[in-house]
Amino acid sequence: MSRALFGSAVALVAAAVALSPATVMAQTVKIGVINSYSGFVAQAADEMQKGMDLYVKEHEKDLPAGVKLDLIKRDDTSKPDVGKRLAQELIARDHVNLLAGVILSPVAAAVAPLTAEGRVPFVITNAAGVAIPRLSPYVVRVSFTLWQEGYPIGKWAAQQGWKTAYTSVTDFIAGHDAEAAFTKGFTDGGGKIIGADRFPPANPDFTPFIQRVKDAKPDVAFLWVPAQEQAVAIMKAVKDLGLREAGINITSTQDLLPDEQLPIIGDAAIGLVTSGNYSVDAKRPANTAFLAAWKRAYGDKAIADFFSVDGWDGMAMIFDLIKATKGDFTTDQAMAFFKTWKGPNSPRGPIAIDPATRDIVQNIYIRKVEKIDGKLADVEIQTIPMVKDPWKELNPAK
Amino acid sequence: MAAPRSVRARVAGIAAAPDSGAAAVEAFARRHRFRPYEALPWLAALAAYFLFPGYLPLASQILATILFALSADLVLGYAGIVTLGQAAFFGAGAYTAGLLAAHGWGEPITGLLAAAVTAAAIGFLSGLVILRSTGLSLLMQTLVVAAMLGEAANKASAITGGDDGLQGMQVWPLFGHFEFGLYGRTAFFYCFAVLFLCWLAVRRIVHSGFGRSLTGIRENVGRMHAIGAPVMRRRLVAYTISAALAGISGALVAQTTGFVGLDSLGLERSGTVLIMLIIGGVGRLYGAFIGVPLYMVAQDRFSSIEPVYWYFWIGLLMVLLVTFARGGVLGLVDRLRIWGGKRR
Amino acid sequence: MAFSAGLSVVFHGVAFAMVLYLISVGLSVTMGMMGFVNLAHGVFAMAGGYVMTSLMNRYGVPLPLALGAAAAAVALASLPIERLLYRWLYGGDELDQVLLTMGLVFMSGATAQYLCGALQQPLRLPPGLNGGLHLGFGEVPAYDALLIASGAALVTVLWLGIERSRFGAKIRAAVDNLRMAQSVGIDTSRLFGLTFALGSGLAALGGGLGASLITITPGYALDNLVYFLIVVAIGGLGNIRGPFLAALLVGVADSTCKYLVPQFGAFLIYAMTMAILLWRPRGLFGRA
């Protein structure tokens, strides 16, 4: 749907350029967007795409004269080998100037080495695997890592005076990252982990796992699932088994209570504290403007969440590059620009890229779920400014 | 009962007593009954190389998947073992080749052989356990074997890379000279050659006495038992060979993409190869050559036009094929030929 | 304390078993009767879930009514599908059946995503059904209790129906020996259609009731296919008691294994399936 929109917008720009007296040579910037339109992360992919498309729609008038944008979208069907082949085709056949997108860390990990061989910059707008930017000197990430979010909430939990914690996470790499980050944060803050469970990824029903947590009676439970329908399922188990009524506090990263799932999770979430890089409720002007634009484009059919904002910011960074270079840049110029990029007007707050790691540096917010005007919202109660990825600090590149 | 055609051809070939090179070739061709149309897939592949140079990565994957479908055809179309677990062997081969390449031994051809041996071993061991069953029970057991391997691979994520996939594969240049590069030329010819050799082998098996007995087992097991054919042993051999071939195709994919993920062992992979084979036509040897490119090219084209809903169109294509073209594309070709023959 | 935890886990497993049974019983009967490998059976459960949640969320229809309407709608809709698509493939090559039903699975998943988005369908339960229920000796999730109660009621009706009614007798006859059934004058073609509709309606019920246990997403039919097939394979084809026992086994084993050894999850279910199939290849209640 939005391809037709670009098509006509681009045509208009091209026509205007052709008719204007000072005609400039048309410069096309080709961006290959690899997203998981089908497969088990389709919903997250949809959110991310909406964010990217919205930015393009709102800001294509800001493009320099004579510059056209060509977004080539490809579906990796949530499979890394497909994603890798698509990247190969985009680089070798379509000659894209940039690669962007990717939800899943395995896909990003498969694509990254190709960018080194093909010398194409790769802007990651979601995949959170900590080590991915190290796989190629042409990778830059604008989204987040689970250590960035997990470590601060671990520390915060210890600061609440909670002495014991039980972690229960999905058994795959992202879950392991979350678990390791929280554990380090909590133990650094003086707490003790009394149990660590990992449950299978394709799991619709969490009652038995929550029962284990309840049996262990920790002060706090760190429950982590990939942000989507599993969040609702695990919260239902929490509600059904009365975990909170039994005196166990619950915390996690934003993946447990993503904004678009909050209405479904319902009142069971009130009072829960999580860490994250974005919540819809944030009151800063950039977010208000973003949400207004979102509402204009998508109405009530979709709720914005961190996937959307990460996609939006990715396009913002790319647009800044295009504006600075008038659409004409080499790979090294692009990487030099990205490494020092700052985004003060992101809906998330101020963000920047760390030149040493090419990873995102951003505020991490501790948020609490509250009911405001009858609607649930993640309210930011504490800000930890400009957090770099802790894992990379603890594990310097050799 | 007349002697099987292969025996007659062999006798005829010997009786012809070739006395020159050309006659020897002719005798060879007659003995193995190469038909002219059998050159078509190979010519088409070479044509694709020249006509679609930007699509070589896709073409390589198609060639490797054809081999995978061939392995499924051997076990499904010829031995009559309905399996939803072929990916177990594909994945086993892929991880074998992948782990070798990630831990310092990136030589492609030995990697292929190692993959074949590993997959064959798994096929043999699992076949010993499950091949006594039939029908839904057997289907479920093949599924369960693949599922358990998948769980094991996820558990051993320290070795396999788990959900992120196997990292750090370094595949050495083929014959020490031809690098596997971004443009996929080496990969294409590598897959082409391996597929060709395996196809020759499968063709030989299928047209041999062993192959005929497999058809017998598929059609009428009771009869085969009655004439004293070692049914279990034959099925086991077929299953093991098929596993080896599937393992080779897994290794091909791993080496040419430089990546192995958990989905190589997944149900979707087993199911998809089955679908591609059925579309082409099962038990015809060439069903794989038709069904796989058809499905994979349609998937590639559909998903670039409509990234989100292309599953709908593929599903519709499948429903239409079953409703109007039973027996897959080759079945359709057969019917057209008969119809054409009747008209004459 | 441990007892209460154990009770909760087993209770939950039985509730899950009810859902699995309702969905899979139709598959067992149609596979046994028509010999049709219907990999698309999960689509009817999914459709039931979607219709029910849409009625509840968009039109505020109360749960029991929405559930009944969903089951009826899906059962009715399955009749033309059976007549127009499935009928041609009865007694035919299983692989054709696989192709057809997989095609339907793909199409239905894409349609669901198109109509309702990729997000899973929310299930807003009435307040009384959230949280725990005190049962004298322990506390169990309230919705689980509802599932078990309604599941038990439906199962009783179903069993009585199959054992006592004429329709049930016809089904049993057709499963036992199709040709004989035809030669005593049973209109098997109509019977197939009605049985198919009954199985699909039950699946829709299971999908709707179980929407909080097995979430309603576009990928539902494919993601959960293995569990449905396991229940049918272990239970045996063409009968209604086998899948019940199988569902209980799978449900309780699943819940208990996840509680005792969370890492191993599905692995133990697979091993159990393998063991049972090797011991009883036709399933626990399958006919020789």
Image (cartoon, rainbow, N blue to C red):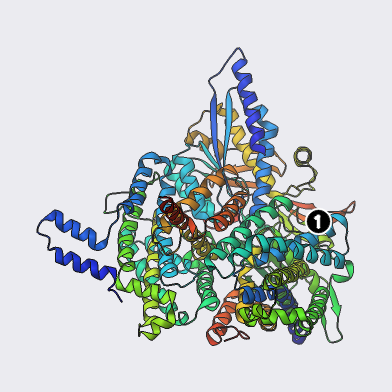
Asked if one can make out residue B20 in the rendered structure from this viewpoint, the answer is yes
Position of residue A262 measured from the top left corner of the image (x, y, whole percent):
78, 56
Q: Quadrant of residue A244?
A: bottom right
Residue B31: x %, y % from top left: 23, 63
In depth, the one of A259 and C25 nearer the eye is C25
For the view shown, which residue lies furthest in the front direction?
Answer: B344
Residue that sits furthest to the top in the current view = A21
Nearer to the camera, A185 or B309: B309
Q: What is the chain letter for disc 1?
A: A
Kind of element beneath mark 1: helix
Q: Is residue A155 visible?
A: no
Q: Is residue C57 above or below residue C259?
A: above
User: Which corner quadrant holds the N terminus of chain B?
Assistant: bottom left
For residue B217, side relative to residue A230 (left or right) = left
Amino acid type indicated by mark 1:
Pro
Q: Residue at the location (43% across, 58% down)?
A: B287
Q: Which residue is mark 1?
A: A263
Position in image of residue A116 (x %, y %): 44, 45
Residue drawn at the location 75% of the way across and 67% of the way down: C204
Could you classify mark 1 by the number of other residues whose Cα lies within 10 Å: few (under 14), some (14-19), or many (20 or more)? some
Q: Is residue B98 left or right of residue A302?
A: left
| Residue B100 located left or right of residue A84 | left
Tally of numbered tags = 1
B46 or A269, which is in the foreground? B46
Quarter of the image holding residue C253? bottom right
The residue furthest left is B19
Between residues A44 and C173, which one lies in front from this camera angle? C173
B199 shown above or below C243: above
Question: In the image, residue A254 lies at what x, y percent?
Answer: 71, 56
